[in-house]
Image: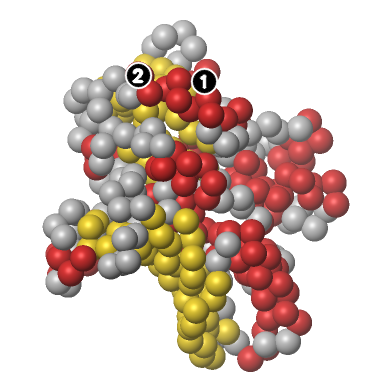
Amino acid sequence: MNSENQLVERTGRAIPSIRGRNGFGGVRLGIGDDAAVIASGGGREWVLTCDQFLEGVHFLGGVHPADSVGYKALSRATSDIAAMGGTPRLFLLALAIPASRMGAWFGGFLRGMSRAARELGLRLAGGDTTKAPKVSINITVLGEIEPGLAVTRAGAQPGDIIYVSGRLGRAQLGLELVRRGLGGRAQFRELLRPHLYPQIQVKLGAWLAAHGVPSAMMDISDGLSTDLRRLCAASQVGARVYEEQVPVVTIPPFAAKCLRGRKVEALQMALHGGDDYGLLFTVAARNARRLARAPEFRDLTAIGEITKGRKILLVARDGGSKPLQPRGWDPFRRS
Ligand SMILES: [Mg+2]
């Protein structure tokens, strides 16, 4: 288990918490999944989550455009609602910001966040602001879902097919370009978009949940290798992922040239790169046909299957397999 998981475990043990499905106070699902699920009392359930986006940890003040910071902060928070199959409704914004960022920077930030809110169908319901030496954004998102339809990480069964949405590693490619100081170049604008303005799978998540297709689901925020391990742990199963089926980022030659000499292999980025916010879900083989009606069906790829036991294996083109090590984003990893 990596250390971010340990920190969450420890917090959940130390503070009185609602864990799993215990029904306390109308809470249908507590800590340990992408978001919590609460009975709203009005014939719907609430889906609740929060996310932090911090200068110096998740973005760089002098490098990332202000509108990207606003857009991404709200999008990544909302991704956990999509991961449950919920429909986003409203959010709370807790913002700490230095006085020097109150002018043009704040204007750009608001533009980006406003665009994300319109695209995601979200309304701001309140929040709090304060001054701090660095920008710190904390967002709580509330979504809604029909009772009982929220899809958790914990339903995958041996034999289920594993699917992902979108190409994996695209956000990582953008990050690699930014890291090398290439973020301002017009020729890279399209390649940077997934890193700066991630697209959240709200429609797909809601459709999958409404049609009861997935047995388990989560969003890929920290990288496939790390997030698949979390899904398998919650479902108490293993997995086999076929290398040649993983939809990897396309690196155009002009970008590859600029990144030459560095570790930027497309498969590695797809397996371990974070921030793509695609959906990772499992489907019983008998239900797989129903996926053909899903929105963005053509963006879905079967990458492997759920297995008995707890091993998570990557099967190479030659048929040989080795453990798929969790090498995605972990803020607490000792390097
Ligand atoms: Mg998540």
Is residue 297 or residue 55 the one in the foreground? 297
331 sits to left or right of 232: right
Is residue 211 or residue 175 the one in the foreground? 211
Which residue sits furthest top? 318
Q: Tell me the residue at 45%/16% (across/down).
A: 316
* In the rendered image, the vertical position of residue 89 relative to residue 98, given as above or below: above
Residue 7 in picture, x, y percent from top left: 26, 61
Q: Tell me where residue 99 sits by quadrant.
A: bottom right
Where does label 1 land, which residue? 245
Where does label 2 land, which residue? 286
**Residue 210 got which mark?**
none
Residue 71 in picture, x, y percent from top left: 63, 64
* In the rendered image, the vertical position of residue 138 relative to residue 296, given as above or below: below
Q: Amino acid at mark 2?
A: Arg
Say if disc 1 is inside 8 Å of ligand 1.
no
Q: Amino acid at mark 1?
A: Gln
Q: Residues within 10 Å of mark 1 (few under 14, many from 20)?
A: some
Q: Tell me the residue at 24%/56% (across/down).
A: 29
18 sits to left or right of 244: left
Q: CA distance from mark 2 to mark 1?
A: 20 Å
Q: Residues within 10 Å of mark 2 (few under 14, many from 20)?
A: few
Residue 295 in picture, x, y percent from top left: 57, 36
263 sits to left or right of 157: right
Visible in this render: residue 231? Answer: yes
Visible in this render: residue 2? Answer: no
Q: Tell me the residue at 68%/81% (across/down).
A: 106
Q: Tell me the residue at 33%/38% (across/down).
A: 216
